[in-house]
Image (tube, coloured by chain):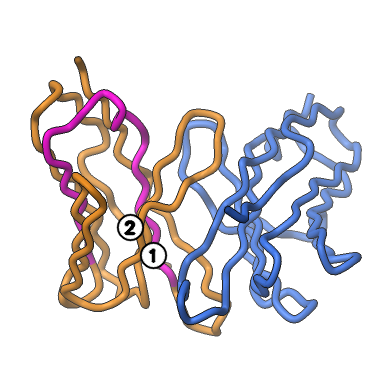
Amino acid sequence: TQLLEQSPQFLSIQEGENLTVYCNSSSVFSSLQWYRQEPGEGPVLLVTVVTGGEVKKLKRLTFQFGDARKDSSLHITAAQPGDTGLYLCAGENSGGSNYKLTFGKGTLLTVNP
Amino acid sequence: EPEVTQTPSHQVTQMGQEVILRCVPISNHLYFYWYRQILGQKVEFLVSFYNNEISEKSEIFDDQFSVERPDGSNFTLKIRSTKLEDSAMYFCASRSTLQSSYNEQFFGPGTRLTVL
């Protein structure tokens, strides 16, 4: 069974601060996706990383996929209250070619004004 | 921008009743999924569907569950006899096969199922 551990589970910071959240596994994934989920809504895709060592930037968000494709990180620079939300990582398993996602429990980020 | 849609947004039912949750995946996507999220817990895979058949199902997806793509656009999840523990958010997702958006799986807004 593939598991994804996200840390920290909760993070409360002040506006303007930088932060990093982590997504770790003992399993290799064919790709890893980061989502943001608001209460009562579906996960919204932020980015997909595919290649080991890959770095992708989305404005103030920087995503990195580990060289071994087992872990990933999300770094937010100069966080804003609008960044508040639940950040989920999900690993794609291409075994059997059904591409199902295994989700972590998420990091609940609160950015205080 | 194309999106996955789901209906209803909220379904309340009595234990033992049948429910059908409906999804319209993004057109030209060929892989379809159902996931569920019990309140406060992580999103869990239920079933994947490709080429008009189930390609994988989880332990959660027992004989009470079924999926169907009846008309080439809708993708449905049926629970034959609901149990209290089926109360959760159910998300439909679809995945492209296009190389330009390879690996990206898009989720619908979810249906909140409440079993009384």
- Dot 1, how many residues are within 10 Å of its Cα: few (below 14), some (14-19), or many (20+)? many
Q: Amino acid at mark 1?
A: Gly
The spot of residue A6 in percent (x, y) is 27, 48
Q: Which residue is mark 2?
A: A4
Q: Which chain is blue?
A: B
Q: Quadrant of the C terminus of chain B?
A: top right
Image: A66 above or below B88: below
Image: B10 above or below A2: above
Calculate the distance from the C-alpha at mark 2 to the C-alpha at mark 1: 8 Å
| Residue B39 located left or right of residue B16 | left
Q: Nearer the viewer, residue B85 or A61?
A: A61
Marks 2 and 1: same chain?
A: yes
Are the two marked residues, 2 and 1, in contact with CB atoms closer than 8 angstroms?
A: yes
Q: Which residue is mark 1?
A: A91
The spot of residue B23 in percent (x, y) is 75, 52
Residue at the farthest left position = A17
The spot of residue B14 in percent (x, y) is 86, 28
Chain letter, disc 1 residue:
A
Helix, strand or loop at label 2? It is loop
- Chain A colour is orange
Name which quarter of the figure residue A79 lies in: top left
Magenta segment boundaries in residue numbering? A71-92
The spot of residue B18 in percent (x, y) is 90, 42
Helix, strand or loop at label 1? It is strand
Residue at the farthest front position = B1
Q: Amino acid at mark 2?
A: Leu
